[in-house]
Amino acid sequence: MGVSMLQGIKIAADEINEAGGIPGRRLVLVERNDEANNDGGAQIAEDLTENQLVDAAVGFVNTGVALAALPYFQEARIPLVLSVTTGSLLTRQFDSTRVRGELYFSVSRPILHSRWKRSPNT
């Protein structure tokens, strides 16, 4: 399910490394497959934040898996970019207007279906 996302991440990392890295440091990808399993995602998050000591993470396709994994990244204060998971449980949980000290940035606009009405804030 996350194959295309992984391919895009690899392409981006290659382009960044070819341009000299961030600032001067090459990106090294540590790939894991949670198999769309909440417990598996949590175990991977624990390993990445406590043993692998990653500087940042990109991933999670499944909202349930992301919800299970997020507490590990939050506790370790490691940035996590979620490009696909947009479930309302996820976006409400980390709404920076309600949780002091948390950063949550939405970089994609929701797709509006013709039956939905646009709210004044979108």
Image: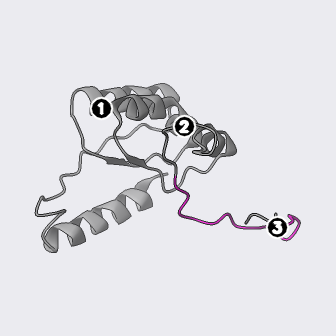
* Badge 1 element: helix
Tag 3: amino acid? Arg
Residue 64 placed where, x, y %? Answer: 58, 36
Which is nearer the N-term, disc 1 or disc 2?
1
Tag 1: amino acid? Thr
Decide: is 5 above or below 46. below
- Residue 59 is left or right of residue 15, and the answer is right
Residue 95 placed where, x, y %? Answer: 61, 44
Q: Are marks 2 and 3 in contact (CB under 8 Å)?
A: no
Reading the image, the residue beneath label 2 is: 100
User: Which quadrant of the rendered structure holds the C terminus?
Assistant: bottom right
Reading the image, the residue beneath label 3 is: 118
Residue 37 placed where, x, y %? Answer: 50, 32
Distance from Cα at disc 3 to Cα at disc 1:
39 Å
Residue at 42 percent across and 33 percent down: it is 74
Given residues 61 and 107, the one toward you in this image is 107
Which span is picked out in magenta?
105-117
Residue 121 is a magenta residue: no
- Residue 27 is left or right of residue 100, and the answer is left
- Residue 71 is left or right of residue 87, and the answer is left
Reading the image, the residue beneath label 1 is: 49
Residue at 46 percent across and 45 percent down: it is 60
